[in-house]
């Protein structure tokens, strides 16, 4: 006789559960016991799991996890339900887990693969309330208890608020004697209040909401004495607490357990578990309840600390982060601040909008070194000082100079105090610095004067959607050297243009450096210009933050993935007004004699300005000519080079402007025109040379003569301007090559 026939004769079936493939193989008897067609087959695990009572399945999951970890037999009692959810029979399962190779899961991680191979046998289910009914559903009480406590501890440890802790406590299904009602009481002074409850209506808590600890009530006694109270029968409840019994009788329960919630030796409250069926409170059952009460107390204590920290951090943020204030005529401002999410969620980043006596407005954004309370406190002092200097009417360079001296002074004093070892001042002894970008804006003209102290440079999105990094001369971070100078850079914000200022957290979060971070933000700015041109700055601000902290950002981490996260501050400024149908695209920057390395920024600026230019070779030509002209200014004069580049539409037949010398070619059919001017303070005009094959200089004018559509040299009082123009050819019928893909003409 076959083994299957023998097992069927004793109402026992065979099954094999594979958690990797998500399938369950059943013989005919096992399928019948599970209310499935009584024939062998392979079923999805979800179809089989739906036949188990939910409470039983939760317990079995823990038992299986423990058996897999220990390599032991998993035994459990399971109630089988039909399609309507009615219990039709009870089966006992005995299975042996066989661990397989870890398999990839849906979330791209790995999980332990295993098969459960064993038997299912129908057993008699005891009636509710009988002695047998009080035994655990599982066949092994201790294994069931250990699995339950592991799950309960993990769930309570993950709860982050009091409400979450109470929800977890309400969902706990204790092995064999699950309560139908729970309540958590908190003690404050000589009063006892309800923190939360489950299994009761809102009106049911009224008599217990606020009571004295002297009240003749089990929870009050538990808090007074620190000892648990177990009431296995209604008679015991009525005998010990006659005054409270009328209030408890209306719930129709048979047994109660009141346990102290103790943390660090202090009783912080009590936990009540009520049961509809009689519970004897055996030593094993009391052990489970006591362990749960300890875990619950710890979870509530952690949640209370976390909620206090959140309340403190939110208060600090509200007090330190300014409101943007009334609307600025002719301007729109949007701002965001996002803490790192760790600790008190405060740091050294800030922004501010300051009305000035002249009628202009000032915008400041900065970052104090550090991510702790010390950085937040120092940030508050620095922000107030900077606002005071700005309100006095000082220009941007003077505001930053005074702020640097202020920060150097207070950190130097703290350093001296820390070296003296007085109190906790040594924790904040190390001097700190701060970066800052300060702008003074004229809403009427769009003029912007900027000064920078070690801060990331801003970006400008032009009216046609082109994104350009705006080079700004700068000095050392605030507080490093009290005598540092901060040069002022000037630009004009045209109607429809947007100025972006941010701290390095927006750029570097997600493992990015400054370059890759700007590339990520440029994509967001350009897509917003194309798809949401008429949306508000608030939408753009949210899009920029989502690009860093949103779900998609987890799949676009940068090359420095192990870099810690940072706070984020972000300010957007847009000038209102009528937009031109074909707005000009321009940039301007200064290259000082002491900053030859900024020639690289000039080349980058030209490529960004011409990002959609049709002729790739003209882009390379423009970069080459600009680099040559600026280098000649730095080498052959003793002044700075001022570069202005502008892309405009060109009417038909326009072949260039007036010039003193140079060459002009036919302007073509009215495409766009690039005009670049580089001015310096020298009166000496350049001369065209005939450099030899190995000469290292003298090629500037020769290159312009060969590559430019028009060029010239214009005397300008004390100094001169060297300029050239390029005319964009009409687009070819085929797809245009990507910018930068052509070879250099040099």
Image (cartoon, grey):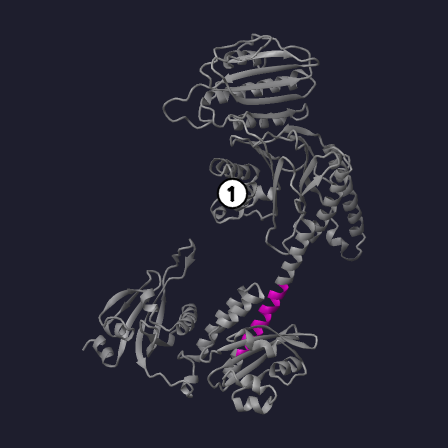
Q: From the viewer's perspective, is residue 408 above or below residue 610?
A: below
Q: Which residue lies furthest to the left in this view?
A: 1
Foreground pick, 135 / 426 = 135
Tell me if 102 is positioned left or right of 11 in this view: right
Check the picture and name the quadrant holding the N terminus.
bottom left
Where residue 403 sits: x, y (%)? 75, 40
Q: In which quarter of the image is residue 329?
A: top right
Residue 679 makes an appearance in the image? yes
Where residue 668 sits: x, y (%)? 45, 14
Foreground pick, 649 / 673 = 649
What segment is highlighted magenta in the picture?
289-305
Judged by its main secondary structure, the magenta piece is helix
The residue beneath circle 1 is 558
Where residue 666 sits: x, y (%)? 47, 11
Q: Quadrant of residue 452?
A: top right
Tell me if 279 is positioned left or right of 471 in this view: left
Where residue 83 sits: x, y (%)? 31, 71
Q: From the viewer's perspective, is residue 616 above or below residue 12?
A: above
Residue 299 is one of the magenta-drawn residues: yes
Q: From the viewer's perspective, is residue 523 above or below residue 700?
A: below
Tell me if 132 is positioned left or right of 337 in this view: left
Residue 332 is one of the magenta-drawn residues: no
Q: Is mark 1 on a helix, strand or loop?
A: loop
At a point 66% along the width and 33% down the height, the residue shown is 443
């Amino acid at each position: 006789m076959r083994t299957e026939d023998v097992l069927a004769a004793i109402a026992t079936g065979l099954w094999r559960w594979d958690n990797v493939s998500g399938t369950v193989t059943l013989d005919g008897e096992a399928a019948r016991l599970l209310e499935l067609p009584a024939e062998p087959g392979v079923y999805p695990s979800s179809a089989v799991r739906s036949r188990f009572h939910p409470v039983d399945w939760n317990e079995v999951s823990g038992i299986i996890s423990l058996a897999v970890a220990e390599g032991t037999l998993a035994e459990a009692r399971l109630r089988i339900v039909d399609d309507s959810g009615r219990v039709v029979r009870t089966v006992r399962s005995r299975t042996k887990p066989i661990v397989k190779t870890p398999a990839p899961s849906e979330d791209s991680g790995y999980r332990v693969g295993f098969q459960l191979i064993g038997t299912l046998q129908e057993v008699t289910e005891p009636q509710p309330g009988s002695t047998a009914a009080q035994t655990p559903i599982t066949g092994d009480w201790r294994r069931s208890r250990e699995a339950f406590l592991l799950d309960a501890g993990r769930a309570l440890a993950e709860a982050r608020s009091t409400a979450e802790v109470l929800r977890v406590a309400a969902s706990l299904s204790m092995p064999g004697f699950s309560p139908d009602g729970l309540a958590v009481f908190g003690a404050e002074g000589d009063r006892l209040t309800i923190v939360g409850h489950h299994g009761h209506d809102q009106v049911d808590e009224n008599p217990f909401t606020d009571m004295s600890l002297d009240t003749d009530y089990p929870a009050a006694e538990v808090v007074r004495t620190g000892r648990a109270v177990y009431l296995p029968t209604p008679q015991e409840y009525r005998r010990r607490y006659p005054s409270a019994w009328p209030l408890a009788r209306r719930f129709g329960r048979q047994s109660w357990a009141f346990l102290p919630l103790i943390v660090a030796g202090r009783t912080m409250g009590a936990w009540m578990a009520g049961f509809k069926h009689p519970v004897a409170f055996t030593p094993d059952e009391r052990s489970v309840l006591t362990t749960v009460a300890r875990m619950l107390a710890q979870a509530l204590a952690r949640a209370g600390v976390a909620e206090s920290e959140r309340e403190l951090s939110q208060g600090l943020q509200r007090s330190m982060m300014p409101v943007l204030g009334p609307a600025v005529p002719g301007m729109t401002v949007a701002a965001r601040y996002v803490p790192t999410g760790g600790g008190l969620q405060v740091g050294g980043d800030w922004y501010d909008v300051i009305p000035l006596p002249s009628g202009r407005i000032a915008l400041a954004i900065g970052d104090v070194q550090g991510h702790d309370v010390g950085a937040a406190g120092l940030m508050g002092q620095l922000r107030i000082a900077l606002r005071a200097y700005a309100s006095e009417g000082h220009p941007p360079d003077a505001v930053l100079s005074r702020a640097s001296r202020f920060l150097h002074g207070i950190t130097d004093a703290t350093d001296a105090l820390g070296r003296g070892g007085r109190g906790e001042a040594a924790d904040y002894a190390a001097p700190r610095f701060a970066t800052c970008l300060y702008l003074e804006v004229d809403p009427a003209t769009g003029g912007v004067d900027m000064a920078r102290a070690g801060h990331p440079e801003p970006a400008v999105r032009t009216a046609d959607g082109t994104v350009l990094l705006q080079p700004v001369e700068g000095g050392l971070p605030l507080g490093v050297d009290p005598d540092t100078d901060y040069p002022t850079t000037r630009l004009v914000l045209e109607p429809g243009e947007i100025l972006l200022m941010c701290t390095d957290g927006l750029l570097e979060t997600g493992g990015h450096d400054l370059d890759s971070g700007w590339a990520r933000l440029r994509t967001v700015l350009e897509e917003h210009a194309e798809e949401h041109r008429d949306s508000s700055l608030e939408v753009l601000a949210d899009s920029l933050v989502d690009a860093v902290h949103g779900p998609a950002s987890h799949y676009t981490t940068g090359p420095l993935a192990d870099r810690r996260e940072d706070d984020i501050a972000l300010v957007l400024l847009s000038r209102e007004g009528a937009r031109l149908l074909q707005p000009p695209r321009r940039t301007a920057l200064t290259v000082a004699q002491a900053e030859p390395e900024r020639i690289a920024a000039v080349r980058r600026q030209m490529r960004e300005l011409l990002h959609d230019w049709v002729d790739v070779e003209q882009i390379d030509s423009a970069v080459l000519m600009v680099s040559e002209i600026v280098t000649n200014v730095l080498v052959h004069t003793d002044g700075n080079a001022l570069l202005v580049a502008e892309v405009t539409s060109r009417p038909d037949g326009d072949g260039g402007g007036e010039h003193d010398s140079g060459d002009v070619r036919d302007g073509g059919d009215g495409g766009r025109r690039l005009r670049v001017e580089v001015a310096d303070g020298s009166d000496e005009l350049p001369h065209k040379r005939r450099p030899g094959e190995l000469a290292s200089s003298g090629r500037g004018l020769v290159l312009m003569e060969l590559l430019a559509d028009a060029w010239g040299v214009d005397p300008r009082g004390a100094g001169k301007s060297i300029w050239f123009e390029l005319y964009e050819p009409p687009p070819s019928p085929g797809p245009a090559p990507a910018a930068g893909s052509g070879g250099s003409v040099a």
